[in-house]
Amino acid sequence: MTVELQDRGVAVCRYDDLLPELGVRALVGDAHVAVFRTFDGAVFAIDAVDPFSGASVLSRGVVGSHGGEPVVVSPMHKQRFELRTGRCVEDPSRHVRVFSVDVVDGRVFVGAGAATDQ
Amino acid sequence: MYGELACGSAVHSVATAQRRREVVKFISHARNEAEAIAKPWSATLAAMDERSSRRLVVIGDGMVGHRFVDAVVQRDASRVWAITVLAEEPRPAYDRVALSSLFAGVTAAELALPSPKRDAVDVRLGEAAVRIDRDQREVTTSNGGVVGYDALVFATGSTPFVPPIPGADAASCFVYRTIEDVAAITAAGATAASGAVIGGGLLGLEAADALRRLGLRTHVIEYANRLMPMQLDDGAGEALRLRIEALGLDVRLGAKTTAIEVRHATSQARRLHFEDGGHLDVDLVVFSAGIRPRDELARACGLAVGERGGVVVDATCRTADSHVWAIGEVACVDGAMFGLVAPGYAMAEVVADRLCGGGDATFADADCSVKLKLLDVDVATFGDAFATSSGALSLVYANPVSGVYKKLVVSDDATRLLGGMLVGDATEYALLRPLVGAELPLPADPAALLRIGDGTGEAVGSGALPSSALVCSCNGVTKGSLCAAIADGAREIGELKTKTGAGTGCGSCVPLMKAIIGDELAAAGIPISKALCEHFEHSRAELFDIVRVTGIRAFSRLVAEYGRDRGCDICKPAVASIFASLGAGHILAGEQAALQDTNDHFLANLQKDGTYSVVPRIPGGEITPAKLAVIAQVAGDFGLYTKITGAQRIDMFGARLDQLPAIWRRLVDAGFESGHAYGKALRTVKSCVGSSWCRFGVQDSVQLAIDLELRYRGLRAPHKVKAAVSGCARECAEARGKDFGVIATEQGWNLYLGGNGGFTPRHAELFAQALDTETLVRLIDRFLMFYIRTADRLQRTSSWLESLDGGLDYLRAVIVDDSLGICAELDAAMAAHVRDYRDEWQGALEDPAVLSRFVSFVNAPGADDHTVQFVSQRHQPRPATATERTRLTDQEAIR
């Protein structure tokens, strides 16, 4: 692993392996991270652990939009989480971490730490 | 006792408007009297209070007696009253109003009235009261028993009147009042070719319908010069006659039967003779010439009876003996008797109120409104239908071609609705009846209240009703109560029924309830949206049609052309289900995979810790020991928790996502396939063991269950679909708790539709009976396909049926009579489903792209998932709680 790679985070998969609106789960350090490619081609990464149930399932949620914002819906009890901010639509006081994402040479890198802590 | 839906007999006992006015007059007079005598009764109550319990004896277990006991039990929370019911009939109270439904396939058992809180009530079936000693306050019963009382209530009802003419006692002469009468008529009908009903009133026409359904050439003989003379005027009677004769019945008006000629050999009726010298040959006769109150016990113990019979009571339904009351058809309120169920219920409530110290209720409103379908003809009358009020004006619309007659009666200044009469089309009844008596100005042209002609007139909405208007007269629910329930969150007819009880009696107010929901929500600015979600304005049924007609099988295109943005967890799985129902290949193929929620996506059921459960199909619940061993082996090898489900199969819990393909490889190799426990799809067809083993079974329920389960396996629907087959009437498979249930009889299969367990349990209703297997399967095919096409998302068949205008009858028209002309399409759709079915798990195992998604971490496939940990409980694994998980992880760290 080179410095460059460490700067960019962990390489989790090839961009082409991500199917639109179908999440995958990756291990980034200790963190379970859910990685999504939205329909417009953007890639987002948030915590995979659903803060309501404690189960590591957000990567398996249905991806869609709410008021134009991309969201994933927890498959456990249907709370929506905004992919850009990690904010829970149903309960804005709850949120998941958002990780930085880079796509370089067809590979997807997820930042080792949370991109935001809000 | 006859009631509002198929409202009653009452030939002479329904109060005419004239009499009704007298009743009202009497009641206001009696109210003063009642207040005067209320004091001694209160004193009696007070004296009784010192006893630990008071004894209430009810004579008669008919509809009114039953309602009365319910009302007392409901009010008497501290169980002050010890209740004894003395019932002459051998069976518990049943819905006599629906007697004619016995000819439409309903069973006698299904007519039974619900008795939710009867544990503490001593109901003595087949034990009649034979003597009353009012001094000792004791009733002697037909068993020789003696029951003491503090309050005695007559609810003995009435008996049909058979005119004293020669031959009236012939073997093939019947009356029409009890389940036993219906059984006798049915038996006699089997060998008869023709029948006559003597009496063309409400009940007589019901009886005529019964004869028609038995396939007899049917004659109606009425002494008056029109049908239903007590309820209808000449014009309305004429419209009804036209309609009925169009059905092939023969109607004779102004005909008085003087004798019945009897065949000597068989004692069967042969010929009716009329006063005018004419005659008519028939094989069977049903008398429906009025009713007589069952007041003989009351007479015998010295209570006053009316001029034409009936126990004389005041406006509180109490006799001159302060311990004795009378309600229903046997009660005579100032010479007036009521042969309808609604006034009887009102009396029951009055007496229950009085006995339970509920205040000063009086029987003030003899609501003799009637709405029913007689021989498929809508008939309704309400309020002052004969325009007897001073200065009353009548507006009449009559169309002799179509057999429609509508009359509104309004006040002399045309500002208030007083009553009306509707024949042939009674659509307006639900709205108009509550308008009677309400203080509100009519529209400028009262005729606008009738939807006549092209319907361009400004119709009056439910908003015109004051909140005090009684919408459901069966259960006494006002518009105000409905509005409160709507404000409280009720949005659908089913919720409104549950919350208020309205619409659960005769059901005639349901259209008005729907209108009120619409108007109230609109008034509150709550859009009544059928939109599936924020991405589609369409309902699920509309989307289904769009997909079906356009052939679109890609969500991206559908949402781009018909929706907005990118969809959500509501519309995506709904559209995926529609695609699956219409046959779009494997549910995980291509773009479809991203539409499925997690259960469908991984073909397993998500559990609380993120693991999945696995359910192989076990058709009909039948499984060989060898296959059981496979399940045991697989569960053992993968460390899965096993549990037998309620649907007669085995659920294996605790499988990690990445284990699912290996588990299923083993199961598929052993001949198992997906059980679709994860899908909004057919789940199982449960069965009892059936005639192969059971000494009671009459048909092979297991074989049919297996056949049905294999036929409908994998069929995606708006919600899960459950089914069952029972091999006999003992119903061990609980088929009536299913979306479709089949019960074997010696005559063939009976099909029940629209049941479910769950949050709001509901029994399925009998749809058709004595079916051969081919017909049965065709009906289920069409039922399922029609449901799949038209139901809302997550709408079970029960609420779907409830939402259909016309309910089960409408469904019958569509899938039996093909009224929409779609049966061929429905049949073809099911044929395509059966032809194209493939096991989803086998398909998944063959597709590397699909299999690649069953991975724990995309960048670390073998890594441990610390969020999934098990502890042992009762010798099996279960998910560790959060605390247990932390402890386990710590221990690992230490180690």
Image (cartoon, rainbow, N blue to C red):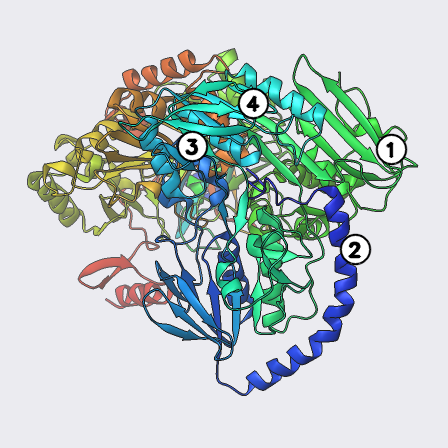
Separation of residues labelled 1 and 4 (CA atoms)? 37 Å
* Local secondary structure at mark 4: helix
Mark 2 chain: B
Mark 1 chain: B
Mark toward the start of the polypeptide (1 vs 3): 1
Question: Which residue sits at x=82%, y=30%?
Answer: B394
Q: Quick check: marks 3 and 4 in contact, CB under 8 Å?
A: no
* Local secondary structure at mark 1: loop
User: What amino acid is at disc 2?
Assistant: Lys
Circle 2 sits on which residue?
B25
| Crowd band around label 2 with a 10 angstrom C-alpha radius: few (<14), some (14–19), many (20+) | few
Image location of residue B456, percent across then percent down:
79, 19
Circle 1 sits on which residue?
B443
Which one is nearer the viewer's eye here, B540 or B593? B540
Image location of residue B892, percent across then percent down:
26, 64
Circle 4 sits on which residue?
B542
Q: Quick check: marks 1 and 3 in contact, CB under 8 Å?
A: no
User: What amino acid is at disc 3?
Assistant: Gln
